[in-house]
Amino acid sequence: MKLSKTIQLLFIALSCFLLGFSFNNNIHPSNDSDDFVQFEADTLLAQLYKTGELWLPFLKKETLLTGVYAIPAGGDDPQSPHTMDEVYYILKGKAKFQAGEEKSEAHKGSIIYVKANVEHHFYDIDEDLEVLVFFSRKILKEKEEEKK
C-alpha cells in the first residue's frame, strides 16, 4: 500500500510532535522555587541514548538551560548558532572544535565558552563525544521581552 505525500508528511509531523512531547517530559520543570536538584550524568546519557537524538535538555530555569549532547565517533555536529551564550564541558571523547575562525582540540576535561550567535561546531570526532552543555537564557529572555 502506497501512501500519498500528504499522508506521509502528516505522519512525519505527528511523529515529530509525539517525539518532542516525550522528549520535553525529560526536562526538569521550570520551578524557580527549587533550591536544589541533583542529576547523574550516566543516567542522563542513558536517557539520551534511548531517544536516538544527539541532545537531551534536563534542567530549564529562567536564566539557565542545561543538557547533555553526544556525537558518535565519525559523526557530524549539525548545530547552528544559538541566541544564547553557551559553555561546553567535555565529559568523554576527543574532537576538534571551531568557533568563528578559532580552532581547538576538545577532549575530556575541556571547558569551552561560545558567545551567542557565533558559528561553531565539533568536527573530526575521533572518539565518542559526550558533553555537558549550559546555555545562558538571559539573552533569549531579553529578546523575547523586546518583542512584546
Image (spheres, helix red, strand yellow):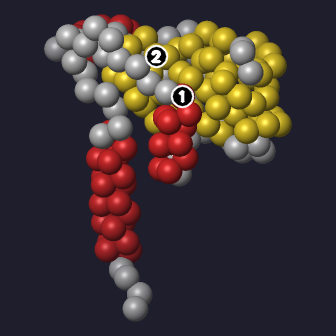
Front residue of 111 and 75: 111
Question: Disc 2 vs disc 1: which is toward the camera?
Answer: 1
Front residue of 39 and 54: 39
Q: Position of residue 34 (x, y in %)?
A: 25, 13
As drawn, 125 above or below 32: below
Dot 2 amino acid type: Phe
Whether residue 148 sits left or right of residue 22 in the image: it is left
What residue does disc 1 label? Answer: 41
Q: Is residue 140 visible?
A: no
Sequence-wise first label, 2 or 1: 1
Front residue of 21 and 39: 39
As drawn, 82 above or below 24: above
Placement of the N terminus among the 4 image quadrants: bottom left
Q: Is residue 36 visible?
A: yes
Q: Residue at x 37, y 82 (%)?
A: 3
What residue does disc 2 label? Answer: 135
| Label 1 element class | helix
Q: Residue at x 50, y 36 (%)?
A: 43
Whether residue 115 sits left or right of residue 144 in the image: it is right
Q: Which image quadrant for residue 100?
A: top right
Dot 1 amino acid type: Ala
Q: Residue at x 29, y 47 (%)?
A: 21
Q: Position of residue 64 (x, y in %)?
A: 38, 14
Q: Which image quadrant for residue 91?
A: top right
Q: Residue at x 26, y 26 (%)?
A: 29
Q: Position of residue 119 (x, y in %)?
A: 62, 21
Q: Which image quadrant for residue 94?
A: top right
Give residue 27's mark: none
**Outermost residue toward the bottom in this view:** 1
Q: CA distance from mark 2 to mark 1?
A: 17 Å
| Label 2 element class | strand
Q: Residues within 10 Å of mark 1 (few under 14, many from 20)?
A: some
